[in-house]
Image (tube, rainbow, N blue to C red):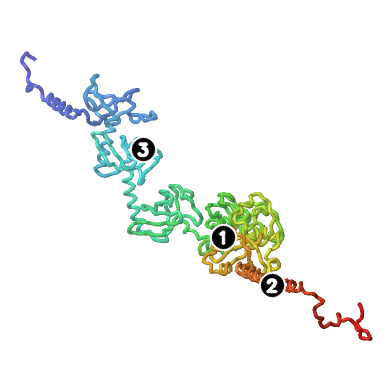
Amino acid sequence: MTTAQTTMNDLPDDFEDFESLLAEYEAKSTAKEGEIVEGVIIDIGKDYVTVDIGYKSEGQIPIEEFTTHEGELTVAMQQKVDVYLEAQENEHGQVELSKEKADKLKIWDDINDAVERDELVEGVITGRVKGGLTVDIGVKAFLPGSQVDLRPVRNLEKYISESFQFKVIKFNKRRGNIVLSRRALLEKEREELKRKTLENLEVGQTMPGIVKNITEYGCFVDLGGIDGLLHITDMSWGRVNHPSEMFEVGDEVNVMVLKFDSRSERVSLGLKQVSEDPWLGVRERYRVGDRVNGKVVSLTDYGAFIELEDGIEGLIHISEMSWTKRPKHPSKMVSIGDIVETVILDIDIDNKRISLGMKQVETNPWELLQERYPVGSVVRGKIRNITNFGLFIGIEEGIDGLIHVSDLDWGNRIKNPTEHFQKGDEVEAVVLHIDVEKERFSLGIKQLSRDPWETIEERYPLGSVVEGNVNKILDFGAIVQIDAAIEGLIHISELSYDKVASVTDVVREGDTVRAKVISLIPEERKIGLSMKRLSEEEASEEYSNYLREQRAEQTTTLGEVLAEKLSGIDASALPEGPADEESAPAESTDGSAASE
């Protein structure tokens, strides 16, 4: 070629074709940084995989990006792969590529497409973080605790490693922020289930369900999109103290629909109604007087409930637990879980009640008491208790006899037993009465001696005069203590001849008075006295004595006068009076008087 300059027009035609082809190739092979491009595996080395993306140089990617966690290779020679172009030329003059970033970008694109199409994504819950859980859906996403289930979940850790479908509720590719919800998906499914369940729901229908929640008053059962309440009273024919005794969350149960309100969508369920009421056959299985064994299932202040069988309970009232003991609480006699032998006392089918007795299993000691201590016999015992109405005397273990205050002494002088007796004192008493039914044992101390009223007529006959102290003033009279056991009444009208406005105008408590017995009614223990009549009688007697004294005085004075008059007269000068037969001298035959 000469020194003349060669122009492009001078080049052969095939060179022009090569130039256009080169330009076209460069245009096609030019990829922008930050984009995903397709490449071909042309070499698999120990540490790197070489990928040709059709650029002027190849790129190398660490082999770890093409292996599993177990170290298995996931690609082969000449396999096409999508890679991310980080730089067209690095410091070594090579294309810088990444398989991981390409995969993540593709995932973000897939998620973005799913969000736009309102589709679900699948993922695995990988861990617990503040406020919720982390989920691997190809990229890391966040699942709030409130979006895990339809109801709040206390133990979120139980979901770790579980796979679920999720709805994307928040997506920001630029910030790398994805928020998921499982609850939204469940709500949608639940609404569809609910619609189908409500279409077929009927009262009296028995259907399966799953226990979703447990409370003190019952548990909520998922019937399929709608929850029904199984109340504690409808769980069993027997006693249920707490629903947790019968169920755990997640249990499957067959329940009966008892009530259903379509407007409020409230459903009441029953479990015991699925089986027959055990009370329907009680009359055939139990009779009054039967001895039955049962387990103590509950204690109250008034007794113990005994389970005879599932759904059948009886009550032992605290008064039916022992013949002799008086427990303050049933727990002093039995404990929950004890197996006890009882006797059926009463059956009330209408109110579903059975009355039981423990003490009836043993012989009633009160029945033996009548044989051991007949009425009228004398017993000895120590005072166990003292009250204002009497003394309790220990006769046998658990059996006390009562000496009423009115039976302590005939005169009823003991008003406060504590002033005369002490606990532990040994006393003797007479058996007055035994009431087996009411379990009462009556004793008396005063009956050890004869009733003073039996001899009242002999000791204080009508008209006799008594003396005593006034121990009580009443509006209508005064009570006089005649002796230790006898009191008499002086009525206000018998106090004085004068009109008495007030009893205290005549007598006061503590005064010693004398009175006349004017009435006597031994059978009513009444004796009437009169000061007025005694004073009347005494006044009359004094007057009589006065008259006698006066007459005696007058007689003595007349005699003295006559004697004085006669003292000066010669007796011989007095004329002789006629002689009586005794004093006249006897005449002799000759008419002369006989000499003495």
Select label 2 or label 1 by which is in front: 2
Secondary structure found at label 3: strand
User: 550 above or below 18?
Assistant: below
Q: Foreground: 250 or 316?
A: 316
Q: What number is the disc on residue 508? A: 1
Estimate the x, y position of residue 381 in percent, counting from the top left. 68, 53
Q: First in sequence: mark 3 or mark 2?
A: 3
| Mark 2: amino acid | Gln
Estimate the x, y position of residue 223 in percent, counting from the top left. 39, 53
Secondary structure found at label 1: loop
Position of the C terminus, as image quadrant, is bottom right
Q: Foreground: 74 or 87?
A: 87
Q: First in sequence: mark 3 or mark 1?
A: 3
| Mark 1: amino acid | Arg
Q: Is residue 362 left or right of residue 247?
A: right
Q: CA distance from mark 3 to mark 1?
A: 104 Å
Q: What number is the disc on residue 125? A: 3
Residue designated by label 2: 554
10 Å crowding of disc 2: few (<14), some (14-19), many (20+): few
Q: First in sequence: mark 2 or mark 1?
A: 1
